[in-house]
Image (cartoon, rainbow, N blue to C red):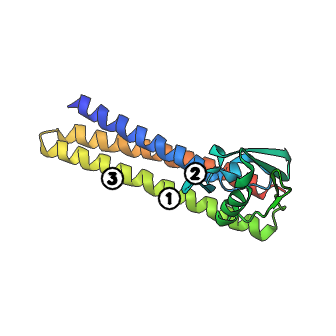
């Protein structure tokens, strides 16, 4: 029985770690004022009839803190890449010089910073909901084991351990949010 409980705990921790990895990926899309190639991670480009991630059809680099350069591997893709960046709704306006796209990242206004903090908080709340959902699944498995003969004391201890794991992950999410919020609000 305790092996099964350990398996439940390990599965819960593993799925919670995946939630944090997803949160990290989502927060990397929330820009904090400086230009970075990661800002264009979600951009999809039409490439020979199929939607393809930008990184698979072009090099994306920064030349300074406010400028991103996108160098397509095939020149005819310039317009499709520009269209993909505009469609991604990132608030960026690519300019073409015939060879590459140059994107000037505008400085953030106070209002835009507040909006980005709200977006970061929403992403963190989604992650917390995911952790709580995984906690519910783990608790349900423990209840099923209790119905199958797990002692009351072991079930109670297992539920407490699941709650402790949940608290650790929720705290990590709060810490991530605090760091991101500080990063966004720093001018």
Q: Position of residue 95 (x, y in %)?
A: 82, 61
- Which numbered mark, 1 or 2, is in the foreground of this view? 2
* C-alpha gap between disc 2 and disc 3: 37 Å
Q: Is residue 22 visible?
A: yes
- Which numbered mark, 2 or 3, is in the foreground of this view? 2
Specify which label sits upstream in the sequence, 1 or 2: 2
Where does label 3 land, which residue?
A: 136
Residue 126 circle label: 1
Quadrant in which the C terminus appears: bottom right
Who's the residue at 78% across and 44% down the image? 61
Position of 151 with respect to 112 (left or right) is left
Where does label 2 land, which residue?
A: 52
**SS at mark 1?**
helix
**SS at mark 2?**
strand
Contact between labelled residues 3 and 2, with CB atoms less than 8 Å apart: no
Specify which label sits upstream in the sequence, 2 or 3: 2
Quarter occupied by residue 87: bottom right
The residue most toward the bottom is 111
Q: Position of residue 177 (x, y in %)?
A: 63, 52
Position of 169 with respect to 107 (left or right) is left
- Which numbered mark, 1 or 3, is in the foreground of this view? 1
* C-alpha gap between disc 1 and disc 3: 15 Å
In front here: 159 or 82? 82
* C-alpha gap between disc 1 and disc 2: 27 Å
Q: Position of residue 44 (x, y in %)?
A: 60, 56
Q: Position of residue 39 (x, y in %)?
A: 70, 52
Quadrant in which the N terminus appears: top left
Who's the residue at 58% across and 51% down the image? 52
Residue density around tag 1, few if under 14, some if 14–19, many if 20 or more, within 10 Å:
some
């Amino acid at each position: 029985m305790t092996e099964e409980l350990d398996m439940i705990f390990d599965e819960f921790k593993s799925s919670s770690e995946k939630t944090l990895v997803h949160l990290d990926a989502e927060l990397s899309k929330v820009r904090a004022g400086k230009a970075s190639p990661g800002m264009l991670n979600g951009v999809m480009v039409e490439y020979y009839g199929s939607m393809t991630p930008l990184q698979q059809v072009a090099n994306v680099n920064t030349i300074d803190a406010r400028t991103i350069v996108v160098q397509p591997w095939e020149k005819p893709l310039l317009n499709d890449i520009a269209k993909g960046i505009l469609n991604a709704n990132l608030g960026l306006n690519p300019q073409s010089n015939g060879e590459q796209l140059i994107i000037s990242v505008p400085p953030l206004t106070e209002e835009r910073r507040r909006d980005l903090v709200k977006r970061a908080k929403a992403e963190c709340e989604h992650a917390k909901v995911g952790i709580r959902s995984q906690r519910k699944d783990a608790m349900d498995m423990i209840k099923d084991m209790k119905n199958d003969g797990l002692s009351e004391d072991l079930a109670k201890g297992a539920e407490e351990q699941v709650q402790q794991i949940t608290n650790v992950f929720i705290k990590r999410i709060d810490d991530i949010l605090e760091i991101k919020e500080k990063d966004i609000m720093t001018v």
